[in-house]
Image (spheres, rainbow, N blue to C red):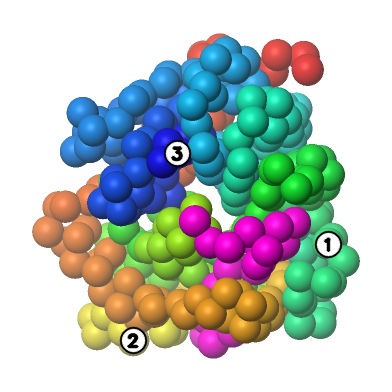
Amino acid sequence: MNVLVAGGGGFVGSILIPELLEVGYNVKCLDTFFFGEEPIKSFRSDIEVIKDDIRTFNPSILKDVDIVINLAAISQPDQTKQIDPKLYYEINHLGCKRIAQLSKEQGIKRFIFTSTCSTYGFQNDIISEKSTTNPIEAYGKSKVLAEKDILSLANDNFTVTILRPGTMYGLSPKMRFDLVVNGMTWALQEFGKINVMRDGNQWRPNVHINDVSKLITLLVEMDKDKIQKEIFNVGANEQNYQILPLAKLIGDSIGAPYDLGWYGEPDTRSYHVDFTKLKKKLGFKIEYSVAKAAKEVYNALSEGKTIKDETTSIIGWYKQLSDKGTIKSLGL
């Protein structure tokens, strides 16, 4: 089976592609590689690499593809508005809509789209897939638009599944330290202090990157009747945390002395998510925990196996690329 992974050089893709290869799939990786090709170095010779943009790629690359997994996105909210909001709508909405539409036109049978729990924005109630979305920034809003357009393409010959992962964490060849668990762990290892975004009461669901990758791999050949036009929150009910208790959990799990501090204006996002559908309908069980992952990230940092640099923050790096003209709005 031939699988195309859009955004395959990113935080999720660089974990997912080796899993797909291990199962025996042939893989094409479509990516702009704005963050470099180092994350795919270990398996580059085993895949077909296509350096291109989902907004502009030639549809011919979809020839002979059976499944498309779209991970491509600006995958972080830009609450400080450092980059052009148009980029979110061009990449996260129109680019994702385009690759889905072209996939359907090319006769591809299955399309898996990774959205985000950020589509829920701010809500006081516990949220299920049936809850109304309430995105409050360009990232969440662009993902909601993409979900709607992609789901509308589904028919008997084109299976569409939408995933809404919680905030991801864990080690990856394309490492990120702008995600709450990874970022807190880095600060603890670097400074012995965990900075908590005010006011600390905001809720975040969390999910390990390996669990997300495992789920996507299973969806590739899952019975389409279980996943057609379905939206799944991806995570575990017990991994919904308020930010201050999450910081304490990370600090306590490492076992090293630490202090807590505060930063920023009060967070505008807060969502406590129900993941019952994932387990009940698909029988999928989350395996990884925050405590275990925090230890792994902490140790990797301590041993120099991973580092925090300018490319490990999505928004900061996109701003640099935008300032240089490397990435820009195409006026779509």
Residue designated by label 2: 252
**Which label sits on residue 133?**
1
Using residue 113 as the reference point, say whether residue 260 is left or right of it: left
Q: Which element type, helix, strand or loop, lies under badge 1?
A: loop
Residue 211 visible here: yes
First of labels 2, 1 by sequence position:
1
Q: Position of residue 137 (x, y in %)?
A: 77, 48
| Discs 3, 2 touching: Cβ within 8 Å | no
Residue at the far left: name it. Answer: 303
First of labels 3, 1 by sequence position:
3
Q: Amino acid at mark 3?
A: Val
For the image, the number of numbered tags is 3
Q: Amino acid at mark 2?
A: Asp
Alpha carbon distance from label 3 to label 2? 41 Å
**Which label sits on residue 3?**
3
Badge 2 crowding class, 10 Å Cα cut-off, few under 14, some 14 to 19, many 20 or more, is few
Q: Is residue 85 magenta?
A: no
Residue occupying the point 57% across, 74% down: 282
Residue occupying the point 84% across, 71% down: 131
Q: Position of residue 191 (x, y in %)?
A: 30, 64
Q: Which element type, helix, strand or loop, lies under badge 3?
A: strand
Q: Is residue 227 magenta?
A: yes
Quadrant occupied by the N terminus: top left
Quadrant occupied by the C terminus: top right
| Discs 2, 1 touching: Cβ within 8 Å | no
Q: Amino acid at mark 1?
A: Thr
